[in-house]
Image (cartoon, grey):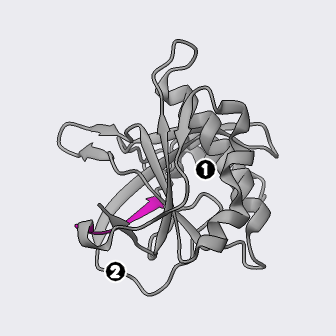
């Protein structure tokens, strides 16, 4: 990844950082969906340079910055992020496209979506639709597989079903990857982005 744009949340009285992340990330997701390929993949990845997570204390923080990375300047120009975030310009600062400062790179990381099973009743209802077991049996099966996480997240709303969900984001330090393929959330468990 050779080029990036940095978006910084500005302090304001209208929205908390959590509300602002929800609005920004919804727009980013729509923008990425517009440029995805036939496999629903995008060649632009994201990082949260201020990301912190303490597993022992169960405390996570995304920070107030996000970086969008691409291999070429043309890829970021095509995304045209300013257009997608124009309604939020009073609440954030968007840099121009910049070269990744090779000399300042301290390592590489993946930022991936961590999905958790959080609702035994929902899982049981879904299983009952198959028609092979009843609700009580399904609920008994799924009561012990419910998992949770304290990872930092962004509260999202599905644009198709209107249901809210938490987009948990997990960061892992990894070696530099050769592949640069990301989801329409700008996340990947295998493609790394530079840290600096």
Horizontal arrangement in the rendering, residue 143 relative to residue 104 (left or right): right
Pointer 2 local density, CA inside 10 Å: few below 14, some 14–19, many at least 20? some
Query: Hey, which quadrant is residue 37 in on the image?
Result: bottom right
**Secondary structure of the residue carrying numbered label 2:** loop
**Secondary structure of the residue carrying numbered label 1:** helix
Pointer 1 local density, CA inside 10 Å: few below 14, some 14–19, many at least 20? some
Name the residue at the right extreme.
160
**Residue 46 appears anywhere in the view:** yes
Is 14 above or below relative to 116? above
Magenta region's main secondary structure?
A: strand
Q: Which residue is disc 1 drawn over?
A: 138
Q: Earlier in the sequence, mark 1 or mark 2?
A: 1
70 in the magenta segment: no
Is 103 above or below relative to 63? below
Span shown in magenta: 105-112
Residue 190, position in %: x, y?
44, 76
User: Which residue is pictured at 46% across the width and 61% down the height?
Assistant: 112
Say which quadrant the C terminus sits in: bottom left
Residue 86, position in %: x, y?
72, 38
Question: What label does residue 176 carry, if any?
Answer: 2
Residue nearer the viewer, 69 or 151:
69
Name the residue at the left extreme.
56
User: Which residue is pictured at 40% across the width and 68% down the height?
Assistant: 100
């Amino acid at each position: 990844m050779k080029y990036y744009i940095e978006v910084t949340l500005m302090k304001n009285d209208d929205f908390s950082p959590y509300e602002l992340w929800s609005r920004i990330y919804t727009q980013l997701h729509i923008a990425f969906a517009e440029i995805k390929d036939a496999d629903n993949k995008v060649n632009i990845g994201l990082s949260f340079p201020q990301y912190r997570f303490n597993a022992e204390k169960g405390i996570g923080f995304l920070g107030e910055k996000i970086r969008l990375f691409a291999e070429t300047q043309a890829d970021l120009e095509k995304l045209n992020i300013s257009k997608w975030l124009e309604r939020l310009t009073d609440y954030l600062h968007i840099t121009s496209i910049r070269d990744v400062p090779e000399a300042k790179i301290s390592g590489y990381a993946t930022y991936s979506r961590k999905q958790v099973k959080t609702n035994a009743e929902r899982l049981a209802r879904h299983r009952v639709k198959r028609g092979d077991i009843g609700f009580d049996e399904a609920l008994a099966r799924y009561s012990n597989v419910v998992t949770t996480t304290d990872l930092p997240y962004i509260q999202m709303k599905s644009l198709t079903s209107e249901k809210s969900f938490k987009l948990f984001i997990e960061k892992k330090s990894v070696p530099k990857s050769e592949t640069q393929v990301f989801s329409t959330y700008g996340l990947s468990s295998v493609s790394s982005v530079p840290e600096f």
